[in-house]
Image: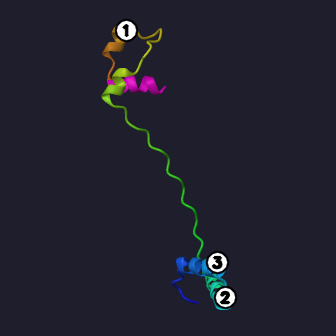
């Protein structure tokens, strides 16, 4: 069995046997298909990798400015103006 099985060659042989059938073309297609199935059966299996978690996109200055923050009963408008960007982001994410 050859280690360099070419799928394109196998496909070409199958198409030739299908649309212009001769005994030689059918035999060639069967031979290549058997080699291909053996090659696939002999492939080494590996464990699937864990999917990466999507990363949170950082907010731009414009997005922070456009975010509508409704002050709660505990926070007054004056106190809201004094909050830092980190505190605003914490409030938005909560």
Q: Secondary structure at mark 2?
A: loop
| The label number, if any, that marks residue 19 in the structure image | 3
- Secondary structure mostly seen in magenta is helix
Report the disc number at residue 77: 1
Q: Is residue 33 magenta?
A: no
Q: Nearer the viewer, mark 1 or mark 2?
A: 2
Indicate the quadrant where residue 48 lies.
bottom right
Mark 1 vs mark 3: which is more N-terminal? 3
Which residue matches tag 2? 22
> Quick one: 33 or 52, which is closer to the camera?
33
- The magenta segment is 85-94
Q: Is residue 42 visible?
A: no
In this orientation, does residue 51 appear?
Answer: yes
Graded by Cα atoms within 10 Å as few (under 14), some (14 to 19) or many (20 or more), the crowding at tag 3 reads: few
Q: Residues within 10 Å of mark 2 (few under 14, many from 20)?
A: few
Q: Is residue 92 magenta?
A: yes
Ranked by sequence position, the earlier of labels 1 and 2 is: 2
Q: Is residue 61 left or right of residue 22?
A: left
């Amino acid at each position: 069995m050859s280690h360099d099985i070419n799928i394109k060659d196998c496909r070409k042989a199958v198409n030739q046997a299908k649309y212009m059938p001769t005994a030689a073309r059918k035999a060639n297609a069967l031979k290549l298909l058997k080699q291909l199935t053996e090659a696939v059966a002999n492939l080494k299996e590996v464990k699937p990798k864990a999917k990466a978690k999507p990363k949170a996109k950082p907010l731009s200055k414009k997005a922070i400015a456009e975010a509508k923050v409704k002050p709660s009963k505990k926070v007054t408008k004056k106190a809201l103006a004094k909050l830092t960007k980190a505190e605003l982001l914490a409030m938005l994410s909560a």
